[in-house]
Image: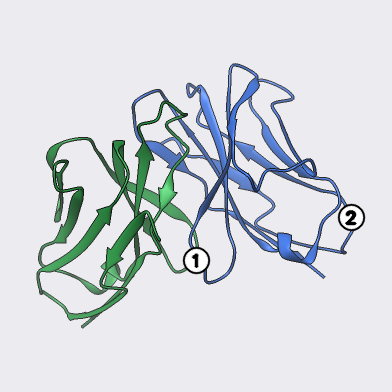
Chain colours: A green, B blue
Amino acid sequence: KNEVEQSPQNLTAQEGEFITINCSYSVGISALHWLQQHPGGGIVSLFMLSSGKKKHGRLIATINIQEKHSSLHITASHPRDSAVYICAVSPNYGGSQGNLIFGKGTKLSVKP
Amino acid sequence: EPEVTQTPSHQVTQMGQEVILRCVPISNHLYFYWYRQILGQKVEFLVSFYNNEISEKSEIFDDQFSVERPDGSNFTLKIRSTKLEDSAMYFCASGISGNTIYFGEGSWLTVV
């Protein structure tokens, strides 16, 4: 069983659409990360969350600790948002914060 | 903006050869990590390093792997005797306790 599940696996949107990517996890966590992997392969950290909601530009991330669920929203999507979005969690068993469990990623394609 | 830099960006090596992947973390960061991503699969944690020693490692990080911080700036991953299944993208990352983890662009390793 995957400890971090993302949905959908693939998502195609038209420019301007509102996008939601979901992440569910089965372990207790100290933090949840949303990452962006661009086509060249490099990874960029978008958010680190332990509660509530964070916003950066057109990106919004929310987390519900009780329900073990997080969402990443993109408002007014643009073709440059096309990338793989990865959810990763830091389990709270006391290990290093970088011992992340990664989801398989959601491949987003935004068409002009 | 400060960034994690990795070299080489791509390396092709013969099976059985030793490989060293290099990383320069962000200068005031104290925690250092290596991850790998086999093509088409999710990212996996390899090792975390703090205060000049390994703080945690995964099952993947067996005796053929080692890490070192030989000077004040570099953080290296050595694979002693490469196998075909070591072909992957290797990501270095760094961070400060309780904060965002910053990833490098990755080093593609192809073992032939």
Q: Amino acid at mark 1?
A: Gly
Residue at point 78% right, 66% down?
A: B84
Q: Is residue B19 left or right of residue A112?
A: right
Q: Is residue A65 left or right of residue A83?
A: left
For mark 1, name the chain. A
Residue at 48% of width from left, 61% of height from top?
Answer: B42
Q: Nearer the viewer, residue B3 or A64?
A: A64
Q: Assign a secondary structure to mark 2.
A: loop
Chain letter for mark 2, please. B
Q: Residue at x 15, y 78 (%)?
A: A15
- Residue B70 in percent (x, y) is at 74, 25
Point out residue B61 in the picture as x, y percentages from the top left corner: 67, 43
Left or right of B13? Residue A93 is left
Nearer the observer: mark 1 or 2; the answer is 2
**Percent position of residue B72, x then y:** 65, 20
Q: Which residue is labeled 2 in the image?
A: B17
Direction top: furthest residue: B51
Mark carried by residue A40: 1
The dot on residue A32 is none
Say if A37 sits above or below B102 in the image. below
Q: In which quadrant of the rendered view does residue A78 lie?
A: bottom left
The residue lying toward the viewer, choosing from A30 and B24, is: A30
Element marked by disc 1: loop
- Type of amino acid at the residue the image marks with label 2: Gln
Furthest residue toward front: A1
Q: Is residue A103 above or below residue A29?
A: below
* Residues at marks 1 and 2, CA–CA distance in whole angstroms: 26 Å
Q: Are marks 1 and 2 on the same chain?
A: no
Quadrant of the snapshot with the N terminus of chain B = top left
Return the x and y of residue A55 as percentages of the image width and height: 13, 45
Q: Decide if residue B104 is on the left or right side of residue B64.
A: left
Say which residue appears at 39% left-offset and 50% top-offset: A44
